[in-house]
Image (cartoon, rainbow, N blue to C red):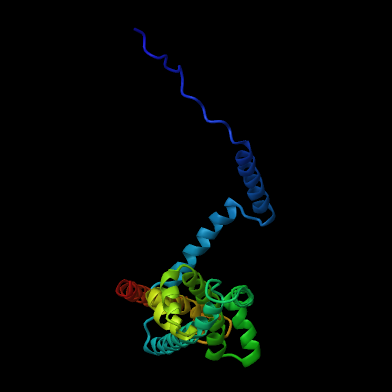
């Protein structure tokens, strides 16, 4: 008895022409953008030679006591900026994120809060720092205020999303007892989000520590000011020393933040 006939070849998948056309269009547009932005292999090759000369002038790092003292002062100021901006930014993000949670507040309030969050997230910390430098002058205050605004935009958005993912059963149970809105937040909302909020705050501190270097370049205080000054003076060995210290500090903070996140989970 003969078995069922097997197909002579596997059935081919139908060609997805819209996807192929989209990829082809993306490739054509990429080539066009490279042509108008003067992106070429020759520039990349010449850039490698310039980079080699730059790194050659950076080594060895400058470890002179006067330079290290200046760098230490800048790093301490950057840490202070990061701590203050994280504390104030996350503190202000609590009511803003709560007001943006559509499952806890009226829709009109959530829409208004999300508009404020969108404004805070619309600009890079460097741009905000430039505005504050013009408003309050050069120094750590401008950088701290810029990072507070940046922290509010990031933390409040994620905090609102965390609040919208919580279980409503606990909220309904607390409300059934006749508890006020404040008691509902304390006994039903906070226990569900406190661990994730702490982890989010630790991550924001790590981000603010990195951004404090950038805002210092435009006058926001911290180690960025020392880095920009060393670059302008062609003290590339000092630049390398600052970069190595920044990398070591960021790695240390990353290890510490990972430990904190594991504890709070």
Q: In the rendered image, which quarter is residue 122 located in?
A: bottom right
Residue visible at 59% across and 90% down?
138
- For the question of whether residue 221 can be seen, the reply is yes
| Quarter of the figure that contains the C terminus | bottom left
Q: Residue furthest top?
A: 1
Q: Residue furthest right?
A: 36
Number of labelled discs?
0
Q: Is residue 265 left or right of residue 178?
A: left
| Quarter of the figure that contains the N terminus | top left
**x%, y% of residue 28?**
66, 45
Residue visible at 54% across and 91% down?
141
Q: Is residue 92 left or right of residue 73?
A: right
Of the pair 103 and 95, the residue shown nearer to us: 103
Of the pair 121 and 147, the residue shown nearer to us: 121
**x%, y% of residue 200?**
43, 74
Q: Residue furthest front?
A: 177
Of the pair 232 and 179, the residue shown nearer to us: 179
Residue visible at 50% across and 71% down?
158
- For the question of whether residue 242 can be seen, the reply is no
Residue visible at 54% across and 85% down?
143
**x%, y% of residue 187?**
39, 81
Q: In the rendered image, which quarter is residue 25 located in?
A: top right
Of the pair 28 and 156, the residue shown nearer to us: 156
Q: Is residue 141 left or right of residue 7?
A: right
Answer above or below: position of 26 versus 216: above
**x%, y% of residue 82?**
46, 84
């Amino acid at each position: 008895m003969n078995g069922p006939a097997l197909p002579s070849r596997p059935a081919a998948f139908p060609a997805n022409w819209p996807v192929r056309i989209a990829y082809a269009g993306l490739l054509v547009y990429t080539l066009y953008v490279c042509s108008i932005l003067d992106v070429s292999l020759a520039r990349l090759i010449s850039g490698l030679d310039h980079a080699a000369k730059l790194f050659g002038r950076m080594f060895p790092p400058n470890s002179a006591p006067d330079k290290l003292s200046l760098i230490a002062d800048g790093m301490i100021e950057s840490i202070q900026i990061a701590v203050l901006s994280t504390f104030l930014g996350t503190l202000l993000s609590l009511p803003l994120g709560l007001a943006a949670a559509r499952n806890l507040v009226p829709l009109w309030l959530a829409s208004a809060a999300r508009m404020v969050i969108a404004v805070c997230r619309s600009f890079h910390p460097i741009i905000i720092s430039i505005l504050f430098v013009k408003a309050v002058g050069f120094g750590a205050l401008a950088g701290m205020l810029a990072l507070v605004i940046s922290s509010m935009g990031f933390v409040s958005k994620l905090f609102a999303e965390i609040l919208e993912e919580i279980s409503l059963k606990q909220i309904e149970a607390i409300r059934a007892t006749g508890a006020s809105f404040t008691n509902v937040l304390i006994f039903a909302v906070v226990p569900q989000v406190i661990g994730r909020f702490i982890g989010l705050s630790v991550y924001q501190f790590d981000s603010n520590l990195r951004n404090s270097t950038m805002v210092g370049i435009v006058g926001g205080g911290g180690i960025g000011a020392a880095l920009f000054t060393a670059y302008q003076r062609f003290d590339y060995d000092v630049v390398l020393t600052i970069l190595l210290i920044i990398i070591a500090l960021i790695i240390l903070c990353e290890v510490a933040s990972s430990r904190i996140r594991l504890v709070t989970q």
